[in-house]
Amino acid sequence: MLKRIIICTFLIFSIFMNAQNEKPDRAPFTLTVAVDTVNYYQQEVPKSPYFVKEKVLQIYPSEKLFIEAEVKADSIYSMKVVKENLNPEKTITLEFIQNVEGKSHAGMMLTVKNPFEKRLTYEALMYINGGSKWISTSIIPIRPKLMNFEMWNDIILSLVLVEWKLE
């Protein structure tokens, strides 16, 4: 009887802790992106979901995210942003930054860490400074257990990452 109580207590506690770790929305913030030594782009980003649709992630420069993925039958079934990387074996780490040299734009970089035993692929759309539409950009697949660095010369205000797959 005591063993059942301990097991039930542990299960309830672990469910509660996992729910506490979820982070479905970003806090509002001011996005500031360098353009040149004098000009910069600035935008108020309101509180908004990271996943704008199922498995459709929007990320802004300066954000670092932990994406916990549920895998079923060798494919990504669901994804959610979490506050802490409590399950590194199933958590994709992303960081999107702007490189600046002397107050001037020097490039954008997206870092993605693949925790899985299979190759991770996804597609990306970018919205650039001065643009009027989302533009598709090429992405290199990430080999198992490795990290990938995507770099662009464009001044990217946001990326949308879609079509997440394990191959």
Image: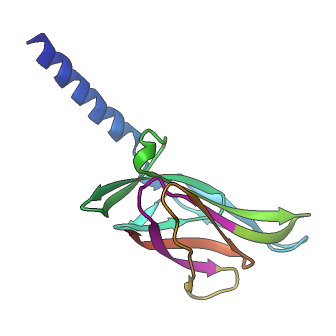
Q: In which quadrant will I find the N terminus?
A: top left
Q: Residue at x 59, y 53 (%)?
A: 64
Q: Residue at x 17, y 24 (%)?
A: 8
Asked which colour scheme the image uses, the reply is rainbow
Q: Does 51 appear above or below 159?
A: above
Q: In which quadrant will I find the C terminus?
A: bottom left
Q: Residue at x 56, y 55 (%)?
A: 28
Magenta-colored segment: predominant secondary structure: strand
3 left or right of 114?
Answer: left
53 left or right of 41?
Answer: left
Percent of width and height locating residue 95: 61, 57
Q: What is the residue that sits farthest to the bottom in this orientation?
A: 132
Q: Does 5 appear above or below 63?
A: above
* Residue 152 visible: yes
* Residue 41 visible: no
Residue 110 magenta: yes
Residue 58 magenta: no
Q: Nearer the viewer, residue 91 or 57?
A: 91
Q: Which residues are magenta?
A: 109-127
